[in-house]
Image: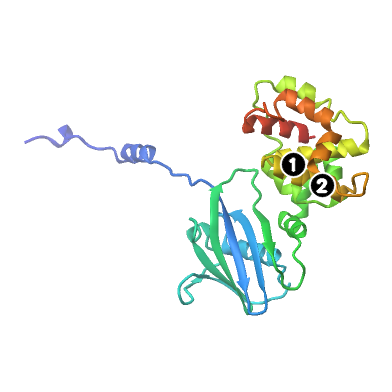
Amino acid sequence: MVGLMSLKVTDLSQARAKREDSLVTLKREPLTVICQVSNVRAEAEAHRQIGFSDAFTFAELHRVLEVSFGLPDEDSPWHFYEHRDARGCRIDPEHQVSEFLWKEGDQVDYVWGLWDFSLVVAEIYPRDTGTPEALCVGGSGSFLVPFDLTAINAELTGQETIDEVLNIVVPPVRAIIERTKLFDFVPLLQALDLERPESTDNADTSRAGLDSLPREVTSEGQDAFWSMTLGLSCMGGHELTNSVAEATMEALGWVADDGASLSGEEIRELCAASLEELAAMGAYGADALAPVDRLDIYRALLRR
């Protein structure tokens, strides 16, 4: 007979420790959900395209919808429901959005008072620490107040966040945003993550060139440069860059000699010397660097 002392005895504490060391922890990637939200009534329609963190609870999403649609500030009953042919089960407002809206085409229904809304996922993409928690990216129609994208996003962003972002941008850009009330730029500046360190190999060389900008000496030329820089930072191509710069210069009150709005090409001409310097650094023009390297230069240019 084999003695008990000769048997191989397992140390339970060691086994538990070994098991815990072998466990794989799965970390879910944070995502941004873009939803098409619609309210269709016999007499009118209202639509919004809204982006928000999938870590939101439905209670937090409720506030985003109230702000985005300008719903009255009153104690009306509201609920979310699973989408079915008939009305589905009511969703606990403390549940996370990601439990129900996690792929394109997913839908939930939202009821506020007597109004019904459908929320359909249009896109989902990864988010990082610089991505705004919630943003209205477009829309049409309204209820009690006209649709005002800038005002909606200012309220969604919150004054505290607006102040934090404006405190880290260069004074001329802060002044442009405050003069024009174009607070739509705040989410863009958030997404740029201005405090991220530069990673380009020629950071020192770029810094020396950036410190010389803008080259223009007139107020119009300097405003043109910063308007164009904000447009370039959107990373959306020539047409979008022009559109952003045109809207900014118009909001600043600059016009052509004939009183017409300045075109994107005219704005580029107003700050041609500065754009030439950006091109030499690889941040502009046909020989521009890769997008990630251009973003490093734009961050360095825009931050205080």
Residue toward you, 225 or 287: 287
From this viewpoint, which residue is outermost toward the left? 1
Q: In the image, what residue occupies the spot 79% across and 23% down?
A: 209
Residue at the spot x=82%, y=26% of the render?
211
Q: Secondary structure at mark 1?
A: helix
Q: Are marks 2 and 1 in contact (CB under 8 Å)?
A: yes
Identify the image quadrant of the N terminus.
top left
Judge whether residue 238 can be spotted in this image. Answer: yes
Q: How far is disc 2 from disc 1 in space, using C-alphas?
A: 9 Å
Measured as percent of width and height from the top left, residue 54 is found at 55, 54
Between residue 169 and residue 267, name the one nearer to us: 267
Amino acid type at image mark 2: Thr
Relative to 51, is 2 above or below?
above
Q: Residues within 10 Å of mark 1 (few under 14, many from 20)?
A: many
State the image coordinates of residue 121 (x, y, percent, origin top left): 53, 59
Task: Quadrant for residue 9, please give it.
Answer: top left
Count of labels in the image: 2
Residue 56 visible to an observer of this rendering:
no
Tag 2's secondary structure? Answer: helix
Please, is residue 201 above or below residue 88 in the view? above
Quadrant showing the C terminus: top right
2 or 1: tag closer to the N-terminus: 1
Q: Position of residue 290 (x, y in %)?
A: 62, 30
Coloration of the structure image: rainbow
What amino acid is at disc 1? Gly
At 58% from the left edge and 46% from the top edge, which residue is drawn? 127
Image position, residue 210 (x, y; %): 79, 26
For disc 2, the marked residue is 248
Which quadrant holds residue 285? Answer: top right
Residue nearer the viewer, 14 or 119: 119
Q: Which mark is residue 231?
A: 1
